[in-house]
Amino acid sequence: MVDTYSLEQLFTLAFPQLDATGQQQAKTLYQSLASGKAISIEDFSKKINLPASETEQLLNSWTGVIFDDKNNITAFWGLSTTPTTHRFFINDIELFTWCAWDLLFMPHILQQTVKTETRCPITDTSIQLTISEQCIEQVSPPEAMITFIKPDLDALKQNVTGSFCQYIFFVASEAAGKQWQQQQENGFLLSMDQGYRLGENIIKKVFNDIQ
């Protein structure tokens, strides 16, 4: 049996530990990136009402913030404006995530229903979901599951994509997932509902002061 509670604790600690002000700033960053475009430090500083120099210091103190070569913010803890194999749509805006699991909790952060698409690494099947803040509304194929690992906390903080995201996919079926497990000694599978509830619980804890 998968201990989702210990996973919940691990990922809650990996995320920047934020007070109420920081939580609102982080939510604002997510919402800004949800426009589908990178955002400059100057523009973000205006949104959170801080001088640009203080905003840059703030962003550098957080883990999981990615900048491009022009020092614009392109991604933050799972949400990316740079193309990956895991994509989702809010209305006509195309966005991306670092791993498949990120797709499941973006509706909780962005407070929007999203349509997602990614591919099974074993069968190359297209896996599509419709996800709201309340539930997973649709999964195709319905037997799809999530590959997962339990990483080290320090590794998560230092390099979340390298230590975790590169191992996390949606697979078309349990059989495909078992094939993946043969390649990953410490890998295991979660149902879509387990992954959704795990993400939901983490986001509620990370943003507990501004729910």
Image (tube, rainbow, N blue to C red):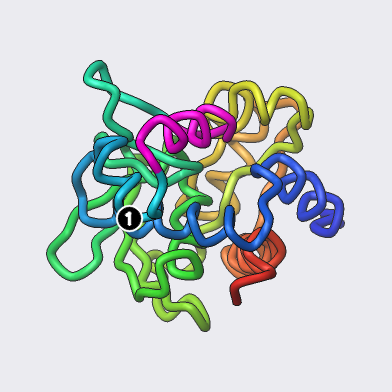
The answer to whether residue 196 is left or right of residue 111 is right
Depth order, front residue of 196/133: 133
Q: In the figure, residue 156 lies in which quadrant?
A: top right
Depth order, front residue of 1/58: 58
Residue at image point 63% right, 64% down: 207
The answer to whether residue 195 is left or right of residue 143 is right
Please rate how many residues cluster around mark 1, counting C-alpha atoms within 10 Å: few if below 14, some from 14 to 19, many from 20. few
Chain part drawn in magenta: 51-65
Q: Is residue 191 visible?
A: no
Q: Indicate the position of residue 26 as horizontal and vertical percent values.
A: 50, 52
Task: Please say whether residue 5 is one of the residues in the magenta stretch.
Answer: no
Q: Indicate the position of residue 122 as horizontal and vertical percent values.
A: 45, 36
Which residue position holds label 1? 47
Residue at image point 62% right, 68% down: 200
Q: Indicate the position of residue 202 as horizontal and vertical percent values.
A: 68, 60
Residue at image point 48% right, 64% down: 109
Residue farthest along the top direction in this orientation: 69
The C terminus lies in quadrant: bottom right
Depth order, front residue of 185/25: 25
Q: Amino acid at mark 1?
A: Lys
Q: In the figure, residue 191 lies in which quadrant?
A: bottom right
Main SS of residues in magenta = helix
Residue at image point 24% right, 61% down: 89
The N terminus lies in quadrant: bottom right
Under circle 1, the secondary element is: helix
